[in-house]
Image (cartoon, helix red, strand yellow):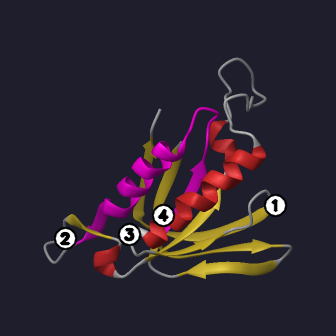
């Protein structure tokens, strides 16, 4: 599992030209699953995202978590994170998880962030063509993954 975390001042996702979800200050998450991921994997990644401290404190240090700044999450499923271009210029997605299992884990990951860590989590539409707009704050982008 791999999560690209972007600290944002605002972000939204549109489907078919209409805004589906939007947040202000918080994280835009691009979430991808590989074939070997399990619920144990999502537990680890949810904990890392929830406890990540990339917001500035009064001293200007990245020392505050999402809950401490009362931020939100916009979580977007993105299987292309596991696109492999080592052998070709056309990505291979053989490591990406199958659609149904990835959707189940994606929903569980988001629910874990909500229920276990008390975070506000909005979502994109799994498997749809989405247009994501964001204002990356910093910019701050962190990649968290678990093999």
Query: Do the residues under discs 3 and 1 have CB atoms within 8 angstroms?
Result: no
Q: Which residue is mark 1?
A: 129
Closer to the observer: label 2 or label 4?
Answer: 4
Residue that lies at the very extreme toward the left in this rendered image: 59
Could you tell me residue 27's position as x and y percent?
47, 67
Q: CA distance from mark 3 to mark 1?
A: 29 Å
Residue plotted at (47% across, 72% down):
114
Q: CA distance from mark 2 to mark 4?
A: 30 Å
Q: Which residue is mark 3?
A: 117
Q: Is residue 58 left or right of residue 119?
A: left
Could you tell me residue 21's position as x and y percent?
66, 79
**Circle 1 sits in a helix, a strand or a loop, which is it?**
loop
Residue that lies at the very extreme toward the right in this rendered image: 16
Whether residue 28 appears in this view of the structure is: yes
Nearest to the observer: residue 145 or residue 132: 145
Closer to the observer: label 4 or label 1?
Answer: 4
Instruction: Kindly identify which numbered label has been placed on residue 60.
Output: 2
Earlier residue among tags 4 and 3: 4
Residue plotted at (61% across, 52% down):
105
Q: CA distance from mark 2 to mark 1?
A: 38 Å
Residue plotted at (54% across, 58% down):
109
Earlier residue among tags 2 and 1: 2
Could you tell me residue 59's position as x and y percent?
13, 73
**Circle 4 sits in a helix, a strand or a loop, which is it?**
helix
**Circle 3 sits in a helix, a strand or a loop, which is it?**
loop
- The range drawn in magenta is 27-56
Closer to the observer: label 2 or label 1?
Answer: 1
Q: Which residue is mark 4?
A: 112
């Amino acid at each position: 599992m791999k999560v690209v975390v972007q600290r944002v001042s605002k972000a939204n996702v549109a489907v078919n030209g209409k805004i589906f979800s939007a947040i202000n200050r918080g994280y835009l998450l691009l979430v991808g699953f590989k074939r070997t991921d399990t619920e144990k994997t999502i537990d680890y990644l949810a904990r890392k995202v929830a406890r990540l401290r990339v917001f500035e404190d009064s001293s200007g240090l990245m020392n505050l978590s999402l809950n401490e700044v009362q931020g939100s999450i916009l979580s977007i499923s993105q299987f292309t994170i596991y696109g492999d271009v080592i052998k070709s210029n056309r990505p291979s997605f053989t490591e990406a998880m199958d659609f149904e299992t990835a959707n189940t884990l994606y929903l569980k990951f988001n629910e874990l962030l909500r229920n276990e860590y008390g975070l506000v989590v909005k979502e994109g539409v799994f498997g749809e063509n989405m247009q994501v707009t964001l204002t990356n704050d910093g910019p701050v982008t962190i990649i968290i993954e678990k093999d």
